[in-house]
Image (tube, grey):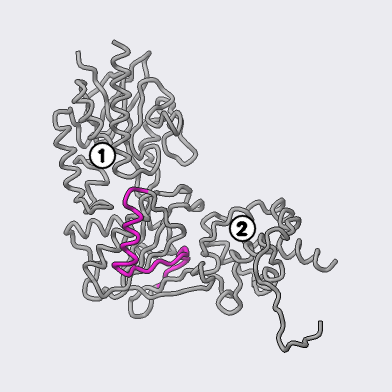
């Protein structure tokens, strides 16, 4: 008999894990609360560092897991443990009994309006990284005034490394995303001056440093080391951005026509809501706590419960996919052992 | 020293970590542990109303104190109006206003001795 594995979340982690479990001969069930698979990546336009279309990645993953049992628009009403099995009640009335659960619940975008000083939702031309991708996907956005794009600003670490906003961790992907989006906008508006305001540039991944060099050398993007302290709207509707240029040590201001806020990754409160029902530990940053952060990242404190992707902390797409495969293998090994 | 050559040797502006006396900074940290938590983002300096005219910068004050440049730090601090704007923008939630008052108290009493 095929072993049922319940995967919570139909983003890239959930899809990849399902695809691998299918290949290994198990029966994954994906439970997704929204009406489509793909999660955050499904809303993105291009992925760093090779400008791979996000749609291509999501479509490929969706195709590879199409034989899984997929419940869309479905949430978990309750979860409890009975001996060595877990019972799940779904919002569509179905109940499932399983020995294996994979959390692929991902993250939430940090709500940029919480950083009121940056004027998201207050000023006319302030957007987030996600809004920009949405617009690049061909959706209209009245905040994007394409006729007057002379100066563009990018604010890194919006809600990341911010203890006051209760999101102390680095979101990992915003530095490289800002560079990617800056290059994309520069390609669209070659005469525009683009400024990236950063605290530290964390470009750790493969090809990231090349991308940064390209942004500086080939595209003339300006990097200013200083966290934006406040943004105000001038009489003519342009935005005045204030920061300290910490390398020179002087206060600096620049007027921009568009300001892009790099909203970071925050924990998904739904993960905690579900995890707390079977007393899974939550880490200090609000993300799910792996049983160890080096060799058992995909394991939880409970037997049969596994993690993959950004539910344990900010991750890139390749990291998430690697974890999904690793979790699938862990589950497979556990199933074999039980037989 | 007599200036017989028509030029003077100016004192080195380099930081010599071997000569930094950490006593006062350690004392400051004992009272204000947040003094060590600054990540030099510059939010405080960008928003400081005194900074534009006087060069006041909480970030630089902390740096100078840790590099043995107390005089520079205290000169900056003397321009602070204690308005507390830096307090509001600090992403690490450092109570900068309280910190500045402690710097004044600890370093200035030491200086007047």
* x and y, in percent, of residue A308 in the image: 33, 34
Question: Is residue A324 located in the magenta-colored stretch of the structure?
Answer: no
As drawn, is A176 to the left or to the right of A227? left
**Mark 1 lies on residue:** A11
Left or right: where A249 falls relative to B81 = left
Closer to the camera in the image, A196 or A281:
A196
Q: Local crowd at mark 2 within 10 Å, few (<14), some, or many (≥20)? A: some
Answer with the quarter of the image where residue A6 lies.
Answer: top left
Bounds of the magenta segment: A205-232
Disc 2/disc 1 C-alpha distance (Å): 41 Å
Image spot of residue A330 (x, y percent): 33, 24
Q: Which of the two marks, 2 or 1, is nearer to us in this view?
A: 1
State the image coordinates of residue A194 (x, y, percent, origin top left): 33, 69
Q: Residues within 10 Å of mark 1 (few under 14, many from 20)?
A: many
Closest to the observer: A74 or A25? A25
Residue A124 visible: no
Above or below — where is A256 with respect to A274? below
Q: Which residue is mark 2?
A: B95
């Amino acid at each position: 008999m095929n072993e049922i594995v319940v995967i919570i979340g139909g983003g890239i982690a959930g899809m990849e894990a399902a695809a691998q479990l299918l290949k290994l001969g198990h029966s994954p069930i994906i439970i997704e609360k929204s009406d489509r698979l793909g999660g955050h990546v499904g809303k993105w336009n291009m992925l760093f560092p090779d400008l791979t279309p996000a749609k291509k990645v999501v479509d490929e993953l969706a195709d590879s897991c199409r034989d899984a049992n997929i419940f869309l628009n479905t949430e978990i009403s309750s979860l409890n443990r009975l001996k060595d099995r877990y019972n799940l009640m779904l919002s569509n009335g179905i109940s499932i009994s399983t020995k294996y659960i994979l959390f692929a619940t991902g993250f939430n975008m940090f709500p940029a309006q919480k950083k009121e000083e940056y004027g998201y939702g207050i000023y006319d031309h302030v957007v987030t990284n996600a809004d920009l991708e949405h617009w690049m996907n061909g959706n209209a956005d009245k905040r994007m005034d394409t006729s007057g794009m002379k100066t563009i600003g990018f604010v890194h670490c919006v809600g990341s490394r911010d203890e006051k906003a209760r999101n102390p961790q680095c979101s990992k992907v915003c530095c490289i995303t800002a560079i990617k989006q800056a290059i994309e906008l520069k390609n669209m508006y070659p005469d525009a001056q683009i400024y990236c305001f950063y605290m530290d540039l964390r470009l750790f991944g493969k090809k990231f440093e090349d991308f940064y060099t390209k942004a500086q050398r080939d595209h003339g993007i300006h990097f200013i080391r200083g966290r934006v302290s406040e943004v105000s709207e001038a009489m003519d509707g342009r935005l005045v951005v204030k920061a300290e240029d910490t390398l020179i040590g002087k206060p600096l201001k620049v007027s921009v026509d568009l300001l892009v806020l790099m909203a970071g990754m925050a924990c998904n409160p739904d993960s905690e809501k579900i995890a707390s029902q079977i007393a899974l530990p939550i880490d200090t940053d609000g993300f799910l706590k792996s049983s160890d952060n080096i060799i058992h990242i995909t394991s939880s404190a409970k037997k049969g419960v596994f993690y993959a992707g950004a539910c344990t902390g900010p991750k890139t797409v390749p990291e998430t996919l690697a974890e999904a495969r690793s979790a699938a293998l862990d589950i497979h090994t556990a199933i074999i052992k039980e037989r | 020293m007599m200036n017989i050559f028509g030029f003077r040797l100016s004192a080195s502006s380099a930081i010599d970590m071997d000569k930094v006396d950490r006593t006062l900074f350690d004392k400051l940290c004992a009272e204000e542990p947040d003094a060590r938590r600054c990540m030099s983002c510059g939010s405080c300096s960008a928003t400081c109303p005194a900074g534009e005219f006087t060069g006041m910068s909480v970030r630089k004050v902390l740096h100078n104190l840790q590099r043995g440049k107390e005089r520079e730090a205290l000169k900056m601090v003397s321009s602070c109006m204690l308005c507390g704007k830096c307090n509001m923008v600090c992403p690490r939630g450092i109570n900068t206003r309280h910190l500045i008052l402690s710097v004044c108290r600890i370093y200035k009493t030491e200086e007047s001795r």
